[in-house]
Amino acid sequence: MMDVLCCKITIGDANPSNPMEIKDAIEITEVQSIEINETYKKLIGTAKITLPKGSVCRSTIIGTVTTEGKDASIFTTEIMEDGVIIEKQTTQRLVDTTTFKVGQRVNIKLGYNGVLKNMFDGYITGYNSESNLEIECENMAYKLKLKKAPHFETPASGTTVNDVLEGEYNILKDTGFKIHSDTKKFDIHIGKIKVTDNFTVADILSEWSKYKVYCFLKYDANNESAMPSIAVGRPYSSSKAQPVFPEDESTGPFKIYFNEHVAQSSLKVVKTDPKFLAVTGKAMGTDEKFFEVTIRLNPEYDPATPGSKQYQTVNATQISKKSHKVTGNTTASGAETKNKVDLSTYTVVPYMSPHIGISSDKLVEETTEYFRNYNLNGITGSLTIFGDFGLPPAVQVELIDHRNPSKNGVYLVEEVTTNFGVGGYRQQLSIPYKIKK
């Protein structure tokens, strides 16, 4: 049996009342290549469509038409619900630089044997016709780059994602986007926010990624015409070292069998000595400044010796006397000396505390607990699968390899690069987080 690649690219103007609807659309069903890059770490996903010279697009003209001197097979009539009869004329023409314009809506569907799955919705941001015709696109979050955020300032104790997006500060107002229902349940706490400049909504949501609060688009798998929602996730956001991401029936886990679904694998299982693992915890104090501590196993730990400590704090941030006087915060052990411990031979894992205004001692407790629960799975590299699943980021996959079961388990997909074209249909997955064995 031969599987035939198929695609459908729809380009046109967005309906102002429903941006997911494309008006006056043209359709392209032949391409040289399509590349889609999406990750939950970035709000803005991208796509690039490459068309060879001589590509043809199809469009439909609605209105009064005549069949005189024309091929009557290209005309159709349709009776609307109100009894009005409309005529449609389907035409084909060559694709060139006049076919598109920046700001138009674009939808990409990919699949095999005529079975198509929605893989990208967004807007055209640019095109190049130097050799082949290349169309550059950004996902639906492109709209948030055009929406100026209101000026506001939250309390020093911080606020929540829910309050910023839809609650008290409501920066998503009039954007057409809503918070994902599962994100609302998390009630994720973030630090103080002060917006006094000409920032867009996209600027604010993208800035949060620096603090391991990731905003990304999540589509309704059962309703392609619905606007995507804003999902927020925190990988390993608590001291229990478990990723917290929105889940529904579309998040898997999807079973990936190496002997059936995998086109190429660069995964390596590297056994790492836990004695050379370190965790750097970071938190925001009540003075609105970040401080950090690093935890590692105590090289001299002896369980038979009373009072011997299993974990050791190194390279902690020294809290100033002024800050100590104002906040009462304490300086963690390991910050007394300016000499830093060389951790170049260690595997250093970051941890961001979800609690604002905590003390150094409390951050040491959280980071130590995170160290105890951290799953050092040793998986590096990426996995390339065929386009059977059409996966987005932030879903779960279950790897099943009977020849090398050491990497079997359920993983969180961080980044997906989709390639479609003359070279086939492939998806490269980055899966650094092992959720369970």
Image: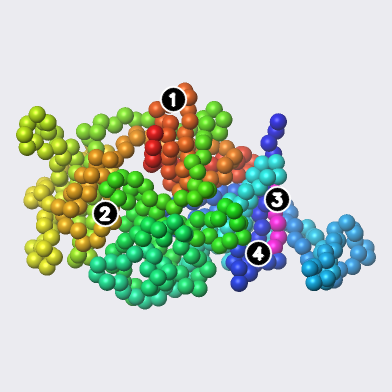
| Residue nearer the viewer, 175 or 382 | 175
The residue segment tinted magenta is: 25-31
Is 257 situated above or below 315? above
Q: Horizontal and vertical percent for residue 85?
A: 84, 69
Disc 3 residue crowd, few under 14, some 14–19, many 20+, Cα 10 Å? some
Measure the alpha-carbon separation of dots 4 and 2.
Answer: 43 Å
Measure the alpha-carbon separation of dots 2 and 1.
Answer: 36 Å
Q: Secondary structure at mark 2?
A: loop
Disc 1 residue crowd, few under 14, some 14–19, many 20+, Cα 10 Å? few
Q: Residue at x 80, y 68 (%)?
A: 80
Which residue is label 4 attached to? 22
Which residue is label 3 attached to? 29
Is 42 situated above or below 98? above
Q: Amino acid at mark 1?
A: Asn
Which residue is label 2 attached to? 353
Give the position of the N terminus as an image quadrant. Answer: top right
Q: Earlier in the sequence, mark 1 or mark 4?
A: 4
Checking the image for residue 404, the label placed there is 1
Q: Amino acid at mark 4?
A: Ile
Q: Amino acid at mark 2?
A: Ser
Q: Earlier in the sequence, mark 4 or mark 2?
A: 4
Contact flag, marks 3 and 1 (Cβ < 8 Å): no
Q: Earlier in the sequence, mark 2 or mark 1?
A: 2
